[in-house]
Image: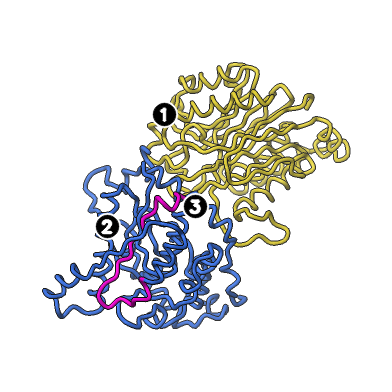
Amino acid sequence: MAATSSSALLIDAPLVERILVGFLREEVGSAGLRRAVLGLSGGIDSAVSCALAARALGPEQVLAVCLPCRGSDPASERDARAVAAALGVRFEVEDISPQVDAWSTRHPDADRLRRGNKMARERMAVLYDHSAATSALVVGTSNKTELLLGYGTLFGDMASAVNPIGDLYKTQVFQLARHLSLPEAVITKAPTADLWSGQTDEAEMGFTYADVDRLLWDLVERRLTDAELAAAGHAPEFVARVRRLIARSQFKRRMPLIAKLTERTINADFRYPRDWGT
Amino acid sequence: MHAPLNVCLAQCDAILGDVGRNLDAHLALIEQARGQGAGLVVFPELSLTGYHLRDLTQEVALRPGAPPLQRLADASRGLDVVAGWIEESEEHALYNAGGWFRDGRLLHVHRKVYPVNYGMFDERRDWAAGDQVAAFDAGFGRAGLLVCEDAWHPSTAFLLYADRADVVVVTSCSPARGVQPAGDEDLPGSPRSARAWDLLLRAQSAAFNLYTVYVNRCGVEDGTTFAGNSRVFGPDGEPLATLGLQPELRLVTLDPAPLRRRRAALPILRDERLDVTLGNLERIARGRYVL
């Protein structure tokens, strides 16, 4: 089995842009809406989603909300502002520290994980409130790498109505960002959830996006066996760890389980398309 | 084939589950095609209903002679029409049907023989499978109709070839999948799924020496982008029309002369040994199945 080179992850960026812009335009329209709202973190994923939404709907129809919290790197807001300015979308900053602080006083012992989840869910709550207030659909910003690894907060940053980049691996998001001519600072900085000072995704996960994307390509897209993965140059312990991460986070990628009682249970044998009645 | 055919490829979107609005869109496009001088207008698979129907399947199903089908038949005077819908049989089985309307009536119905159940597809859950593949006379010569996955089974194109089809019409709702950059030999700006269709139909046209008219849907439904990229191939496999991702009406003339020349140069249809094929198929089938 030949080793997988990163060229397997190359995308036809103009084609991807056309598909994703059409996706956003038609699915927002299918919901009976014309506007979109999304959280703009200053990172590359939300910048790409924002650029696609601006092209699909027109920049004046897109509200980008920067949602910093006490301890967020000021560079994040600066970069988010630069992205919004470059795209011409509406931009607001809404500090979520008051909500998070109110919770912190009741749970001073909460660890980083709980604190990160809390912040992600507060951001989700703000975005969905904007959605109702302005008749705008919430656009998702989770890429395929983090969705597969479960590197996100259920009902937090993973929550959205439509997600244009959920079938793009992180290294492919970078390619699309370059094609979309996003500000260089957003493309070159280390990806971070910005939950605490100095945090980076790759340091926290213990592997690089380049490595894990090559593995995910072979594992998910090519469906290679463990023996084939080893022959392709992926360390068996790395393969085992990533397989575990994927399987253990499957619940995050599905709707809640509904206990079956009737003969037409929602989503089991009551199965209608999402675009039903639009 | 004894007369030229001006075929209009109606590469279009559909509104999921709304037969009435889709029918209105059909009638408007038929009139546009008529204005362009078309003798045949071809809509994609399930053009009257949309694709991701699931439990809507039985709600949008049409019995033979249902008013929307009669409206299409009425519109087919002076201009043949191919469209797609869910057909409900006398036994209440639901088929993915493609129909050819001509001179005010439904001339031919093809029920999709191979509903797909792998990868992203779950068609057998909702649709019965048809069991007939037949060519028919359609004014200009003989035509055959296939729906999407049918064309990936070489037996269907072979049967239409053996049944002396001059033009095979393939309708589909093929999603855009695979976004790797095209190689030097590939079609630039097309998803891999469209390149696969191109390769298949180009080869079949050349192998069976007939025209292929491929009309795929475009637009987005339930997150899926349909790939468009409708095509016409000549009897030597050369592309005569190549559409992109967007909605488009495209008129192409299919001329009898190249078909005649091709079949004179390569008389494989003349020399075809159906008795040999049939005998060997029976031998193979008896070995594999209880008959």
Depicted B46 relative to depicted A98: above or below: above
Q: Is residue A119 left or right of residue B197?
A: left
How many angstroms separate mark 3 from mark 2 (CA)?
A: 29 Å
* Residue to which mark 3 is pinned: A21
Which residue is painted at 82% across and 40% down in the image?
A: B268
Q: Residue furthest left?
A: A106
The numbered dot on residue A256 is 2
The image shows residue A259 at horizontal and vertical percentages of 22, 53
Amino acid carrying mark 1 in the image: His
Instruction: State the residue in front, A165 or A270.
Output: A165
Marks 3 and 2 in Cβ contact (< 8 Å): no
Secondary element at tag 1: loop
Chain bearing mark 3: A
Tell me, for residue B92, which label it has, or none: 1
- In the picture, the quarter occupied by the C terminus of chain B is top right
Chain to which the residue tagged by mark 2 belongs: A
Residue A204 vs B21, above or below: the answer is below
- Color of chain B here? yellow
Q: Residues within 10 Å of mark 2 (few under 14, many from 20)?
A: few
Disc 1 chain ID: B
Magenta residues span A56-77
